[in-house]
Image (cartoon, rainbow, N blue to C red):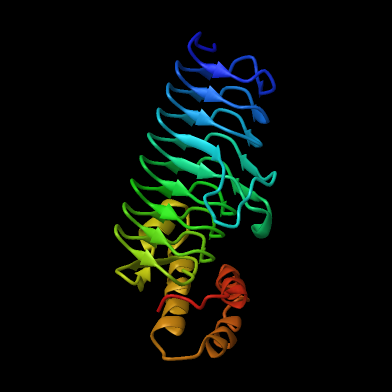
């Protein structure tokens, strides 16, 4: 299962059925679970833990040191869940001591070619990074987010669940859940209705979220005023609470 031309450190822990292609380098402090497939010319450094049934394509670099200038060799970590796909030339960096020490990636995500996840980021589940999408350090990406090609995300931003960023968007503030953004700098352009339909949201739920969107983005209210009005909708539409919680926790302000 391990090609004779691969270089796997004796201290690495690989499950018996992990496939490793030629000219791949796996360092010490790397743990890889069952069913993961690794192509040729991949570099994986640790401390890194990779879960089950991931697919890592050629020239990807997983678990490398952070390039942050504050990083000076501290023991930091990368944790990857199950069934993720890392296409050609992805770069995923470990955390920094100043940022909590760990970069975390969940399950069932797709990282297309040349995508980048920087130090101390958290990526949820079923997220899509299209070609060349990149997130800077300390970014949080919630579940079911789609980042289009060439999207860039400023450090410390939060990208809410079920949101969609069109190709080339430059995101410098937080993106609320369910919202579509585009432009440089990114601005809100409606609800991600198509994505919500695909994930089983009913017409009545989508209609309620559209009303919530108008309250936040079309009524010239402050965020506090918008949240007060949104709270009246949560009894009949509990999904609105996701928006309220996100707005309450936003530290950078939201795209408008």
Please indicate whether residue 116 sits to the left or right of residue 46 in the image: left
For the point 47% across and 91% down, the residue is 221
Q: Residue at x 29, y 59 (%)?
A: 168
When asked about the image quadrant of residue 232, the answer is: bottom right
| Location of residue 25 in the rendering, given as x and y in whole percent from the top left corner | 52, 24
Residue at 43% x, 77% y is: 213
Question: Which percent across, then down, holds residue 97?
Answer: 68, 54
116 versus 140 height, above or below? above
Q: Using residue 256 as the reference point, say whether residue 16 is left or right of it.
A: right
Number of marks in picture: 0
- Nearer to us in this view, 236 or 182: 182
Q: Where does residue 204 sit, x and y in percent of width and height?
A: 46, 68
Residue 11, position as x, y percentages in the image: 69, 22
Which of the pair 138/216 is nearer the observer? 138
Q: In which quarter of the image is the N terminus?
A: top right
Q: In this view, does 164 lie above or below 88?
A: below
Residue, far top:
4
Q: In this view, does 102 lie above or below 255?
A: above
Q: Quadrant of the C terminus?
A: bottom left
């Amino acid at each position: 299962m391990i090609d004779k031309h691969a270089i796997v450190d004796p201290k690495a822990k690989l499950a018996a059925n992990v496939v490793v292609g030629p000219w791949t380098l796996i360092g010490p402090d790397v743990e890889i679970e069952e069913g993961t497939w690794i192509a040729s010319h991949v570099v994986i450094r640790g401390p890194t833990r990779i879960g089950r049934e991931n697919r890592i394509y050629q020239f990807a670099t997983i678990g490398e040191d952070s390039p942050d200038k504050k990083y000076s060799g501290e023991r930091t970590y990368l944790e990857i869940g199950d069934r993720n796909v890392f296409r050609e030339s992805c770069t995923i960096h470990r955390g920094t001591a100043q940022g909590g020490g760990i970069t975390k990636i969940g399950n069932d995500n797709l990282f297309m070619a040349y995508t980048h996840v920087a130090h101390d980021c958290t990526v949820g589940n079923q997220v899509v990074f299209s070609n060349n999408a990149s997130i800077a350090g300390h970014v949080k990406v919630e579940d079911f987010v789609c980042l289009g090609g060439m999207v860039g995300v400023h450090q410390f931003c939060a990208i809410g669940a079920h949101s969609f960023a069109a190709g080339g968007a430059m995101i410098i503030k937080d993106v609320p859940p369910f919202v579509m953004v585009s432009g440089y700098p990114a601005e809100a352009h409606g609800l991600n209705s198509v994505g919500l339909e695909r994930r089983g949201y009913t017409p009545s739920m989508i209609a309620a979220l559209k009303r919530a969107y108008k309250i936040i983005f079309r009524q010239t209210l402050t965020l506090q005023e918008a949240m007060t009005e949104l709270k009246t909708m949560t009894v009949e539409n509990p999904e609105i609470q996701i928006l309220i919680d996100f707005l309450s926790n936003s530290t950078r302000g939201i795209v408008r």
